[in-house]
Image (cartoon, helix red, strand yellow):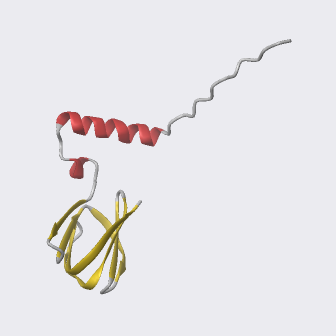
Amino acid sequence: MSMKKKRRVVKPIPVQKEKKKLKARVVDLLELPKEIVLNLPLISMMGNEELHIENYKGMIEYSEEKIRIHTAIGIVKIEGRGLFLKAITTEHITIHGVIVKIEFLV
């Protein structure tokens, strides 16, 4: 009777994930601003009436009740009443209105 040894299969980690993890570690070590180096969105809010997003990639949907914005980490969905774009440039976007809900769709 022969006993077979079970081989443990190790799934290779994609190179892209490895690079992202390494880059994130270097950013943490050197205390660099993550939003700039890792191209992460910087989101700030003033009360429930104004939302400012830096480092966005594009706008997917726009209405008075819902705005969806594409970022490096996924889609940011803003819901509210009377929403409008107060300012928009290639680097940042400012949304004004009564903001009821913010969702991150990754």
Q: Position of residue 21 (x, y in %)?
A: 36, 38
Q: Which is nearer the eye, 95 or 6?
A: 6
In the rendered view, does 66 fall on the left or right side of 34? right
* Rendered position, 72 above or below 70: above
Extreme-left residue of the structure: 46
- Residue in the image at 23% along x and 38% along y: 28
The answer to whether residue 14 is above or below residue 45 is: above
Which x, y percent locates residue 82?
24, 87
Give the image location of residue 29, x and y in percent. 21, 33
Which quadrant would the C terminus be assigned to in this image?
bottom left
Q: Quadrant of residue 99?
A: bottom left
> Where does the N terminus fall, quadrant-wise?
top right
Residue 42 image point, x, y percent: 22, 59
Left or right: 91 in relation to 79: left
Of 27 and 100, the residue lying toward us: 100
Residue at the image position 34 percent from the left and 80 percent from the top: 66
Residue situated in front as seen by the camera: 104 or 37: 104
Q: Quadrant of residue 56?
A: bottom left
Q: Which residue is depicted at the point 43% across and 41% down?
A: 17
Residue 17, above or below 95: above
**Residue shown at 23% from the left, 84% from the top:** 84
Q: Is residue 30 above or below residue 95?
A: above
